[in-house]
Image (cartoon, grey):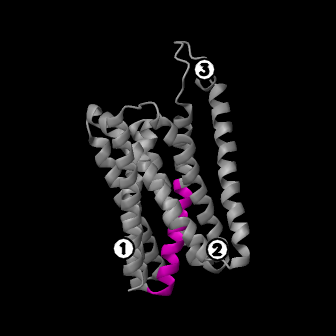
Amino acid sequence: MNLLILIIIFTAIGGFLSVMAAAVFLLLKDHHRNAVLPHGISFAIGALLAVAFWGLIPEAFEKVKPDHFQALSATILAGILGFFVLEKLLIWRHCHHGSCEAHGDDHEGHGHSHSNVKSAGALIILGDSIHNFVDGVLIAAAFLTDVKLGIVTSLAVAAHEIPQEVGDFAILLDSGYSRSKALLYNVLASLTTVLGGILAYFSLEDLHDSLPYFLALAASSFIYIAVADLIPSLHTKTDIKTSLQQIILIAAGVLLICSLHTVAHNIEFA
């Protein structure tokens, strides 16, 4: 079978499986989904931070020479600051379309707003698209090295994408997206994996030098979303039971992603 067709098929597998998992979440009844949603946010925090610090950042530094470490660190810093500016622009845009909850002038006098969580939805789509694009490049690179390695790598990518995408879907719902729009944006973000694979097939040598910086930008987006947007939303409930649940679920997200990365690494290099 043509190598390009194999790359397209296997880059699409991860997106298909993750969308199916999100669709199952979508089928839950409203009261069940509302009960699960806060737990999904906690789990997503752990998963996002683990993907950034356990997978993307180490991988980025492995792919550059030591004299490029400072430039790569600067990319991560610039990415975090850039996403802060982007979120400010998103909030500013919302403030010019009706009442501005971010500034505390909602008409019901509630004062506090969840606008930071709402803007997280747009950022999670952007961060996912970057991350999935890089996954597509990695899968294509593996296939161009060896077909068996490409198959194993694509399955490993799918394995760690599924729990992360379900968490991201929960974030989109919590950000105010409808179920149909959240599912649509998940599908569109997953298609960037195929795009990355196709572009890498035709121009892998040109993309190879830029790959660590794609990884760094994806990591910075996940760090910013988890720390600036999602963690503050967990502080609205401070009782011991809820706090323990949040800690356990964050730890579960970290452990699952780290375990999947470890297993994938051992399989890949066995």
The amino acid on which the numbered mark 1 sits, given as a three-letter code, is: Val
> At 36% across and 65% down in the image, what residue appears?
159
Residue tagged 2: 207
Residue lying at the far top of the rendered structure? 108
**Residue 31 vertical placement versus 162 (above, below):** above
Kind of residue at disc 3: Gly
Which quarter of the figure is the N terminus placed in? bottom left
Determine which residue is flagged by label 1. Answer: 263
Range of magenta residues: 128-146
- Whole-number angstrom distance, CA of label 3 to CA of label 2: 45 Å
Q: Is residue 268 left or right of residue 220?
A: left
Q: CA distance from mark 1 to mark 2?
A: 27 Å
The kind of secondary structure element at disc 2 is helix
Using the rendered view, name the quadrant where residue 253 is placed. bottom left
- Residue 25 in the image: x percent, y percent? 31, 45
Q: For mark 1, does the 10 Å Cα neighbourhood hold few (<14), some (14 to 19), or many (20 or more) residues? A: few
Task: Provide residue 122's location: percent of width, then percent of height.
Answer: 55, 43
